[in-house]
Each structure stands twice: as structure tokens, then as C-alpha cells.
Image (spheres, rainbow, N blue to C red):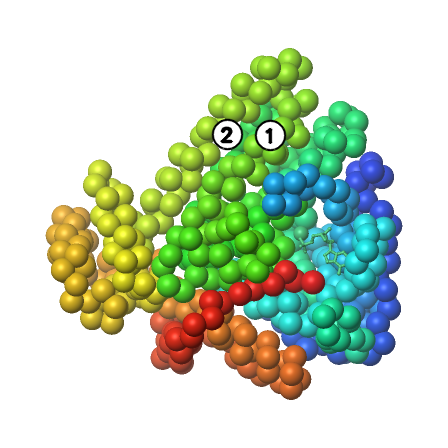
Amino acid sequence: MTHNNMGWNFDNSYVRLPERFFENAEPTKVSSPKTVLFNKQLAEDLGLHANELQTAEGTAILAGNTLPEGAQPIAQAYAGHQFGNFTMLGDGRAVMLGEQITPDGERKDIQLKGSGRTPFSRGGDGRATLGPMLREYIISEAMHALRIPTNRSLAVVTTGDSVRREVELPGAVLTRVADSHLRIGTFEYAARWGSEEELRELADYAINRHYPDIEDNPDRYLTFFREVVKRQAELIAEWQLVGFIHGVMNTDNMTVSGETIDYGPCAFMDVYDPATVFSSIDVQGRYAYQNQPGIGQWNLARFAEALLPLLHERQEHAIDQAKEILGEYKDFYDDYWLAGMRKKLGLHNREEQDSVLIQDLLDIMEESDADFTNTFRALTLSEPEKTPMHGEEAFTDWFQRWQERLSRQEKSRDEVFQLMKRSNPNVIPRNHRVEEALEAAVQNGDFSVTERLIEVLSAPYAYTKDQEPYIKLPEPTNRPYQTYCGT
Ligand code: AMP
Ligand code: MG
């Protein structure tokens, strides 16, 4: 029999960076771990043996009680601008086990979140509670199914230990899988406390890992910056197109790979209102839906500042070059967003007036408190009578203009329908559904509601009958939905 290591195949490149970038940190042992959610398909894609990982030995690994073969556990160092203020951070409640090389040759960070204190924990306990870890699992997997770049969730394990928040709550560990955890904040950290050589090593590492095509480019740091600008613009456009509100777009929560990361108080917008904010701590609405694209650019400006020493030896020159690229962000963003909105309306080709047609619809939706997802769903299914805008003159006129616009492209009804169906999700993680799932799990230890929700959200463009109960809106209430940071 060959040696069985459950398929772990680590090659840990991050720990080959200068020591400044991490601290060794072992996960803290927990008393009685139990796997409550497990992503079998993801395990298989990673080359892991799903059945073995679900045994007691596997659970011990996912809980941080034993280390898989080849792991080199560390906490990563990073800084970041939180709500506009620069501060030192680092993984205070997460431990990176290492980088799994998949059967397809991809490199994926395997990280345990909620696995105990690290040198970066400051006053925190390094722990996570069950509700927020389930929430991250549900939403990150839903985002993946929506085809939006994101870190993934492999498992949630309850620890058997309680965690002290305002009340005692069940502790949990989430296994996160990401293309990397290189954050804008990692670069800010290097720029502030590292040498120029260390900053360069970090940039070369990020380029090698995420943008290998530009490695030989003579202007590679400038090109690197431009590529990150593009990916962030595209990512945020994708968020806007499905109504995803990240909630805490601090620079430490934005990756250079262009993946969505650090799901905390995030939630999907229901009623279309550009000013929507769900996070209880975001009292100023800094990270409101309508502000996300602009904040993306603000964050990239912080990234540019960190990269300046690499861009040009003369600082003024470096600043001019960075500014020019930063100026392109809005065009990248607008192009991605407009292309996405055209698809949502079934438009295969382009016309000059499309942005007016789109904005007019959004204005009518806002006026009528129309649900964002369900409006596009109703248009996809040719059921305009199911929107609250039905019967209003402005909407009737708009609908007529849209029909005329559709008839000016040489596409059949079915081609329009297929494009819209691919571009407008039938189901999203509705806030009341997510809450219902977390409550059943946390209050009653019943994970079936969460499992069912994950299943429904795994094929958002399928438009199947069994998804229909998940389309319904919650009963109206006077209390606006609020989310809390995932601690
Ligand atoms: P987040 O809001 O999850 O992006 O976290 C912001 C910073 O706070 C990061 O440096 C985290 O590692 C740290 N942090 C959050 N919760 C805890 C905790 N319970 N214990 C220690 N550090 C934490
Ligand atoms: Mg964070």
C-alpha cells in the first residue's frame, strides 16, 4: 500500500519570501471538532481525497488539531486602510497551512480561519463563531456559482469550544481556498516597513503567481499595476451587476489577484437603492452599493502609492505614470459594467443610446422600490406584470423602447432569452434565507437548511422549479436588514 496523505500536495512558495512577510503560527487545538459542512466537489478539484477528509483524521486537519503532510503554518503580515485610516493588521485569526498544487497544476492557498491566536492577534482571541463562518461559506460559494472571482470554502468545522462575544457562541473554523491572499495591504505593509528590495521581491512574487505573462515586460511593475487595476474594475463591475455589497472594502480586504475575499458584513441588495448599506459599523455609508466602484479606485490609489519606488527612480515621474493608469480605471469599469448590463437586457450588439436606456430602467426601479434581482428575472421571463413598476407610464414607455431596441438587432427571441438567462441569476443568497439557515444551525444544530440553500445557490442560472421558493421576498418589516463584522 502506498503512503496515504489524503492527497495533500503542498509547495509553499510564500514562506520563501523574506521573513518580514510572515510569522510562524500553529493553529490552536480545539476540544471536539465536528465537520458540519464539506465541499466534496472542491476537495476533488484540489486533488484531495474527499472521503478520507471526512473521517475523524480529516476533521482533525480541518480543525487545526493535526497538520497535513507538507504544511508550513504561518500568519501573513499585512497592513491596510480601514475606513480610510492606515493601520498594521496581519492574520490575527487565520493560519495559512500552505499552497496545494492541484491535479490541474494550479496553486491554491489553504487557510484555516478562526484557528486561534497568532502574533498578529493584538487584543483578539483568534477565534471565529459558527454563524459568520457558515455565512462566508454560503456566500462565497454562491459568488463562485455566479461566476464571480472569489475565494472558495472547503469546510466548516465546529470546535466544541464556546467563544465569548456579547454572549457565548459556538466556535468554528472555516477552511478557505484562494488563488492567494496577497492584498493591497500586503504591499502597503512592504512599502511602509520593508526595504525597497523586499517590496520588489513581493511584487515579483505576485507577478509570477498571478500575471506570469508580463514577467518579461520591460515596464513590468507599471504593467502589473495596470493589470490589477483592470481586474479590480472587472470584479467590482461584476459585484454591481448582481447587487453584491461587500460591506468592508478596506485595502486589506482587496486582493491583487482580483478575487473577492474577506466576507464579513456582506449581503445582496434586494430593493434597488444605490445608497444601500447593510453593515452596522458603516454608519457613514462609505461602502454603500453606489460607492463601491469609486472606493475601488481609492484603494488602487493606495496600491499605486505603495508601488511608487518600483515604478520609476524619479518620484514625480512615477506619480505621473501611476496617475495616468489610475485614470483608466473608470473606463475599464464603465466598459465592463455596460457590457454586463447589455447582456442583462438581452442586447447582443451596441448602440450609442444603450446607457440611457439602462439608466432609465434603473431610475424607474429606484422610484418603484423594485427588487433588483427579481426585476431582471421578470424581464428575462417576459413577465413584466410581475414587477411593481407594471402599469406605470414611465415603465410602459421604457418597455416599449426596450422592445424596439431588441428588434433592431438581428437576434431571435430565443437568442435574447438565452443571453438574459445566462446573465440574470434566478436566485441569489437572499438575506432572510441566509439568516434562516444560520439560525437553524446555530440555535438547533440543524444544518439541513444551510445545505439546501447551498444546493439551490449552486446553479443560479438554471431557472429550475425547485428554486422558486427562494425567489420570494421576505415579509415586509420596518427594520432594515443589518449585518455585522464576522468576528
Ligand atoms: P477583518 O474584519 O476580518 O478583515 O479583520 C480585520 C483585522 O482584525 C485582521 O487583522 C484580522 O486578523 C483581525 N481580527 C478580526 N477578528 C479577530 C479575532 N477574533 N482575533 C484576532 N484578530 C482578529
Ligand atoms: Mg480582512
Q: Which mark is residue 304?
A: 1
SS at circle 1: helix
Task: Check disc 2 and report the residue beneath it.
Answer: 326
Tags 1 and 2 touching, CB below 8 Å: yes
Front-lying residue, 333 or 423: 333
Q: Tell me residue 249's x, y (percent).
A: 57, 48
- Position of residue 192 relative to residue 182, above or below, is above
Q: Tell me residue 14's x, y (percent).
A: 76, 44
**Residue drawn at x 56%, y 28% as measured from the top left:** 223
Question: Residue 68, can we see it?
Answer: no
**Residue drawn at x 62%, y 22% as measured from the top left:** 311
Inter-mark Cα distance, 1 to 2: 8 Å
Front-lying residue, 271 or 47: 271
Q: Tell me residue 314's x, y (percent).
A: 64, 13
In the rendered structure, which disc, 1 or 2, sits on the residue that comes first in sequence? Answer: 1
Q: Amino acid at mark 1?
A: Ala
**Residue drawn at x 72%, y 30% as measured from the top left:** 191
Question: Residue 182, can we see it?
Answer: yes
- Position of residue 77 relative to residue 190, above or below, is below
Q: Is residue 197 left or right of residue 179?
A: right
